[in-house]
Amino acid sequence: MKLTVCGCGTGHLERVERSWWMRLLFPGRRLYYCSACRSTRLVRKVLRARADTAAREVAGVR
């Protein structure tokens, strides 16, 4: 489980219910599963446009 958004874009992200300890330790973060890279991420609430822009920058696409 990582604390950053992956470079796959938000189209692959699915919201997953957090455990009680995740809610306690990370109240401002949400748990997401990326179906493209099959990773679980505990990140701040994802804003679609902003996350897609960041993913394109990571991939080197403009």
Image: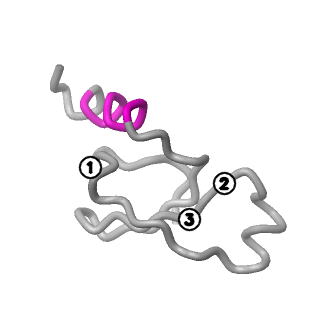
Q: Residues within 10 Å of mark 2 (few under 14, many from 20)?
A: some
Q: Residue at x 32, y 28 (%)?
A: 53
Q: Earlier in the sequence, mark 1 or mark 3?
A: 1
Amino acid type at mark 1 = Cys
Residue 12 percent coordinates (x, y): 28, 59
Closest to the observer, 5 or 48 = 48
Q: Is residue 37 left or right of residue 25?
A: left
Kindly state the secondary structure of the residue where label 1 is placed. Answer: loop
Q: Which residues are magenta?
A: 49-56
The answer to whether residue 50 is above or below residue 39 is above
Q: Residues within 10 Å of mark 1 (few under 14, many from 20)?
A: some
Q: Is residue 46 left or right of residue 14?
A: right
Q: Residue at x 26, y 49 (%)?
A: 8
Residue 17 percent coordinates (x, y): 59, 76
Q: Are marks 1 and 3 in contact (CB under 8 Å)?
A: no
Amino acid type at mark 2 = Arg
How far is disc 2 from disc 1 in space, using C-alphas? 19 Å
Q: Earlier in the sequence, mark 2 or mark 1?
A: 1
- The residue lying furthest to the right in this view is 24
Q: Is residue 36 magenta?
A: no
What residue sits right under mark 3 in the picture?
31
How far is disc 2 from disc 3 in space, using C-alphas? 7 Å
Kindly state the secondary structure of the residue where label 3 is placed. Answer: strand
- The residue lying furthest to the front in this view is 48
User: If the image is split into quadrants, where does the C terminus sit?
Assistant: top left
Residue 41 percent coordinates (x, y): 49, 61
Amino acid type at mark 3 = Leu
How far is disc 1 from disc 3 in space, using C-alphas? 16 Å
Q: Are marks 2 and 3 in contact (CB under 8 Å)?
A: yes
What residue sits right under mark 2 in the picture?
29
Kindly state the secondary structure of the residue where label 2 is placed. Answer: strand
The answer to whether residue 19 is above or below residue 23 is below
